[in-house]
Image (cartoon, rainbow, N blue to C red):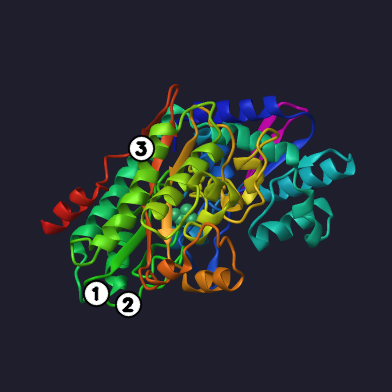
Amino acid sequence: MFNKEIYINRRKRLRAHLGEGVVILLSNNEAPMNYPSNTYRYRQDSSFNYFFGLQLPGLVGVIDLDEGKDMLFGDDYTIDDIIWMGNQPTITELGEMCGISHVQNIDAFTAYMENACAKVRKIHFLPPYRADSQLLLSKLTNMSVYDVNANASVELIKAVIALRNCKQPEEITEIDAVCNTGVKMHLAAIHHCKAGKIERELAGMIEGIALSEGNGISFPVILSQNGETLHNNNHEQILENGRLLLVDAGAESVSGYSSDYTRTFPVSGKFTTKQREIYEIVLKANMDSIAMAKPGLRYFDVHLNATTVIADGLTKLGLMKGNPVDAAKEGAHALFMPHGLGHMLGLDVHDMEGLGENYVGYDEQTKRSTIFGHASLRCGRELQPGFVVTVEPGIYFIPQLIDQWEKEKKFTNYINYNKVREYIGFGGIRIEDDILITQNGCRVLGKALPKTVADIENLMKQ
Ligand code: GLY
């Protein structure tokens, strides 16, 4: 964790965004896999981590806005716990680590909440995404469990997002480092890719790298020759020469920060002409987006430019026709790229998605498009220095979507379905980097991960 001044300052800045009442931030509990004491790898709640830095279950952080007091509640471990888990810090020691002197046990927290409810004080909490937190909030606030999420504090959500969206120098150092782990994972996948292996062998190997350098993967590894399925977590195919392998994977650091990269490469080590032509279009969309991203520009406009590059490239290859600018604007490109250009990245791989994507990636000035494809853009708002976003254009040939659009005669003015049919079985290509918005432009985070056709082919020769 960072030094305690960082957390003291973050809580102070949060208070400055809020009016009256009490802020409650719950730590995540252990989550059982198949019986209570056999748990998944522990994952702290990202907002609790941001404001308190402690990566342990059973804690509650409270920021009393009216009394100007930060509190930490949690029970000390008993000798029975210590026999199994080793010595553990006391709640007093945990409080010291994050700069809090008001520490008490969980019974005291229950009493504190009863008192706050009796006085009808405003209770601010974030929308819970785990059932146990939802049940606890229901009990503490005397609210039906079904009403809890709808009663999450929009004021708190907006305040947390205002802070977490703009990464501070100490966070950028962490993200740079975890990006380097991501780079290692992808280099290993490229080096070890060989016909005859099972996708699972590569997926397991790169997950091991993430675990050896931090908390493990930042989301389940996407690694498949069927790259046209956007989130393909099935790793059971045998690698075959002639096919492309799409790998979308990232790591999470010990402090909880994420990286997220995608590379697509030929199993044989050499792109076919057809693969290279499509690859070069996606690469141009990726590189033009990075060249363009800067403060003051809406990420929607960077996305729109990337989709225009894709429509333009596909028009030159004869898969699309007409004016590519209009085609992309109207959403015809979405047959090939049904997702958005990118998302915020931080303590969550889709940063703060649990607080509401529209609050994170959109604002009063920029509302989400309703056009298929553009509507999937997770972050469209004006970029600010300190934002960390992914840049991940792609081209996919999804047989079911092609069938459906052709049947519906969708965008026949922009799409040459006969030509598109020649690409069924091609798979998909995505190229993804993580960027930091700086004062004048942007910087690609982490060490350079090769992405030109020549670089990839050279790397695979070694
Ligand atoms: N890299 C996975 C995702 O952005 O959804």
Q: Residue at x 23, y 63 (%)?
A: 272
Residue 240 at x, y percent in the picture: 24, 74
Amino acid type, mark 3 = Leu
Tell me the residue that label 3 is attached to.
Answer: 445
In the displayed orientation, state which residue is furthest to the left.
Answer: 462
| First in residue order: circle 1 vs circle 3 | 1
- Whether disc 3's CB lies below 8 Å from ligand 1 is answered no
Residue 280 at x, y percent in the picture: 31, 50
Amino acid type, mark 1 = Glu
In the displayed orientation, state which residue is furthest to the top.
Answer: 439
Q: Looking at the image, is mark 1 or mark 3 nearer the viewer?
A: 1
- Could you tell me which quadrant the C terminus lies in? bottom left
Please give the range of residues in magenta. Answer: 60-74
User: Disc 1 on helix, strand or loop?
Assistant: loop
Residue 243 at x, y percent in the picture: 28, 70
Residue 325 at x, y percent in the picture: 51, 44
- Whether disc 2's CB lies below 8 Å from ligand 1 is answered no
| First in residue order: circle 3 vs circle 2 | 2
Q: Residues within 10 Å of mark 1 (few under 14, many from 20)?
A: some
Tell me the residue that label 1 is attached to.
Answer: 240
Judged left or right of residue 208, residue 362 is right
**Is residue 361 in the magenta section?**
no
Q: Nearer the viewer, residue 120 or 183?
A: 183
The Cα–Cα distance between marks 3 and 2, rounded to whole angstroms, is 32 Å
Q: Which mark is residue 237?
A: 2
Check whether the beta carbons of the residues at disc 1 and disc 2 lie within 8 A of each other.
Answer: yes
User: Disc 2 on helix, strand or loop?
Assistant: loop
